[in-house]
Amino acid sequence: MEYKAIKGTRDFSPLQMQKRNYIFDTITKVYRSHGFLQIETPAMESLNTLMGKYGEEGDKLLFKILDSGMFLKPEEMQEFSSLFSDINDNNQTISINKATKMISEKGLRYDLTVPFARFVVNHRNDIVFPFKRFQIQPVWRADRPQKGRYREFYQCDADIIGSNSLMNEVELLQIINEVFSAFGLPIVIKLNNRKILSAFAELLGKADKITDLTVAIDKLDKIGLDNVINELQEKGFCKEDCEKISPLLNVKGSNEEKLLLLENIIGNIEIGRQGLEEIKYVLTKSNNADINNIELDITLARGLNYYTGAIVEVKALDMQMGSITGGGRYDNLTGIFGMPDVSGVGISFGADRIYDCLEEKGLFPKDIEVATKVLFINFGEKESDFCLHLATTLRKKGISCEIYPESAKLKKQMKYANDRHFPYCILVGEEEIKNSACVLKNMLTGEQETIAFDSLSEKLQ
């Protein structure tokens, strides 16, 4: 029998972990430089916390956790069984949903934003607003695995909550640019505003169908315009509605040209005018901050229900990869947990997709395979005891090292050093101990030199 990792999840080798930690460390460094504070939340949340926050399609992708132990009382068993008595019953979906509630009260988190909103409400008396938090943890979605899409993956979130200022959007765009500049990965930042999309719905006289509209538009890159139109018609948009919306989904040109077109179409709709003013502000301030890779994308929708203002997605240039970062403004996410009128804005880096991009482009640092800097060759009991002292001294000075665990043949130890990509080996025999020196071998060039113990750390640093 083969014991494989569950489809959509992965094992990570030591080298892969070094590359992943490089991504996490780079993002963390930028977050901290902007004053963000780190938190963590549990992997599990109650379904009451999760359900209804991501739209109907998002709810379908939640991993639900079966209650442990005797989750049904004896008197509930008959009711539970009756829910499945007729598989062809017209109320099959209702029955399954009811049965699920009887045996499952928890789920794995779908993202980090909703748990963060719960965190803010629960800890409102312990945090200072505006609160700048970052969080790097795994999330789970019952999605169909494919390239760049996994069932278990990491998100690297940053949010600013408790402030309406659009300067927060600009700061998050700065963070995006700083992170990808550090990676050396060329990107385009796509920007839109949900108020503009709401104006589209009002233009069609279907303000109540904003969710259906955004969910369909959000699929434009994946399924194409014709299929988006078909989905809109299935959701109750008539042919005339689709004829009005189609030109807006095909808009080309500069940001200025797109804004001019939008002003002519939705400028007289209040919510549309608000959205346009917000977009102009963010674009102007971003330009002043030398962020010049922003593209106004009218088709950007991001299907999550909680977004209310600016929405952002990042794409890697010249790569067949979906969004590698996303986010937006949410004006009342904490309201669903009893704390209304607290506005926030956030972004999330998709670490797994970024990993794939850096791997494909060969952008990981060349020395990333170097996990440990020095290997002490083991020549015997007396020599290894001396190496223990030397290794302790080097570690205290921040130099990673290890001692080969047994006095095996030199060829075997050198092969281990090569396979592990150690930059240096240190050889200490009886003669070296007597002279308070060691032989330092550069594993890349093969050169050797004798160095006094007192000078060793300085040489390696």
Image (cartoon, grey):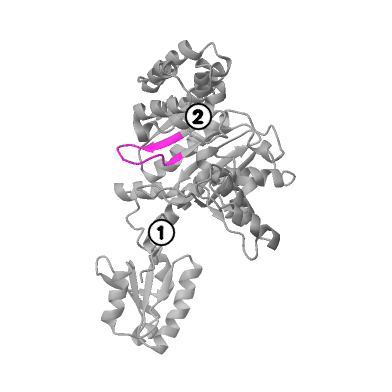
Label disc, if present, on residue 219 of the rendered structure: none
| Residue 319 among magenta residues | yes
Q: Which of 328 and 451 is in front in this view?
A: 328
Left or right: where does residue 141 sit relative to residue 316? right
Q: In this view, does 418 lie above or below 167?
A: below
The dot on residue 212 is 2
Name which residue type carries label 1: Arg
Relative depth, front residue between 203 and 148: 203
SS for tag 2? Answer: helix
37 falls in the magenta region: no
Identify which residue is drawn at 53% across, 30% down: 211
Q: Which of marks 2 and 1 is nearer the N terminus?
A: 1
Q: Which residue is drawn at 27% across and 72% down?
A: 448
* The residue stretch that appears in magenta: 313-325
Counting from the top left corner in percent of width and height, residue 333 is at: 63, 37
Locate the C terminus and report the quarter of the image it occupies: bottom left
Q: Residue 10 carries which label?
A: 1
Magenta stretch: dominant secondary structure: loop
Name the quadrant of the N terminus.
Answer: bottom left
The kind of residue on which mark 2 rests is Asp
Q: How far apart are labels 2 and 1 at the CA level?
A: 34 Å
- Which of the 4 quarters of the picture holds residue 339? top right
Give percent across and percent down for residue 69: 63, 66
Task: Give me the residue at 39% from left, 45% from top.
Answer: 183
Q: What is the crowding at mark 1: few (fewer than 14 residues within 10 Å), some, or many (at least 20)?
A: few
Give the answer, above or below, for where 89 lies relative to 441: above
